[in-house]
Image (cartoon, helix red, strand yellow):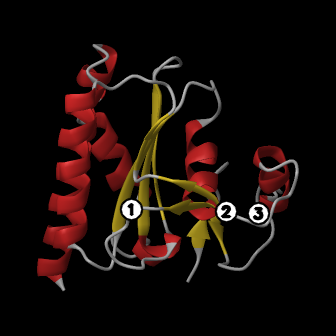
């Protein structure tokens, strides 16, 4: 099943090493974010706030929503990563989804069935990345629409409400897709 290139969004065969349209190389992406080329995946929580943007009560509420998402969809997971790096959010989000080990998943789920919301509060950017197993269920347009619903919250730096809204809208979309099939 084809996926889309994180750079130009063209269709790319599943096991391709680079994009035929823009020549974007996944090996280059890995070298950029993993310069030591370590084989062991970094272990992180499904809610990882390295930017220290969220309050303790907000972390608890969002974690509860993430666990509820996984209870509703036991074969999927949703993770959130906040980091102030001023990097391209779609690229970094996709790399994180495929290269970190999430420590607090309720079931053994591969990144192929994962969704990662990457937020850079300093740059005020966000991206919603998802594994190849979800490609038939979530289109690029739908993920962009989900992000658009929270633009006003992001612009007011209300990240907790924006995150919770995105989790809810993603869940609603997946439920509607399940009812269609």
Q: Which residue is mark 1?
A: 104
Q: Which residue is mark 3?
A: 19
Label drawn at residue 78: none
Say which label, 3 or 1, has the lower sequence index: 3
Q: Secondary structure at mark 3?
A: loop
Residue 142's image quarter? Answer: bottom left
Q: Are marks 1 and 2 in contact (CB under 8 Å)?
A: no
Query: x, y (%) of residue 17?
Result: 80, 70
Q: Nearer the viewer, residue 108 or 28?
A: 108
Q: CA distance from mark 2 to mark 3?
A: 24 Å
Say which label, 1 or 2, has the lower sequence index: 2
Q: CA distance from mark 3 to mark 1?
A: 33 Å
Locate the C terminus by quadrant: bottom left
Q: Which residue is mark 2?
A: 41
Q: CA distance from mark 1 to mark 2?
A: 14 Å
Q: Are marks 2 and 3 in contact (CB under 8 Å)?
A: no
């Amino acid at each position: 099943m084809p996926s889309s290139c994180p750079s130009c969004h063209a269709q790319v065969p599943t096991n391709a090493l680079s994009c035929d349209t823009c020549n974007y190389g996944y090996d280059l992406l890995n070298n950029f974010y993993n310069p030591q080329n370590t084989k062991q995946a970094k272990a992180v929580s499904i809610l990882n706030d390295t930017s220290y943007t969220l309050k303790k009560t907000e972390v608890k509420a969002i974690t509860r929503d993430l666990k509820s998402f996984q209870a509703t969809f036991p074969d999927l997971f949703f993770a959130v990563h906040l980091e102030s790096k001023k990097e391209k959010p779609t690229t970094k989000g996709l790399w994180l989804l495929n290269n970190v080990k999430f420590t607090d998943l309720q079931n053994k789920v591969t990144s192929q069935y994962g969704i990662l919301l990457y937020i850079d509060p300093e740059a005020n950017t966000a991206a919603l990345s998802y594994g190849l197993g979800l490609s038939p269920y979530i289109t690029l347009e739908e993920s962009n629409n989900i992000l658009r619903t929270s633009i006003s919250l992001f612009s007011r730096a209300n990240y907790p409400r924006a995150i919770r809204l995105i989790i809810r809208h993603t869940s609603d979309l997946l439920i509607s897709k399940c009812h269609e099939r």
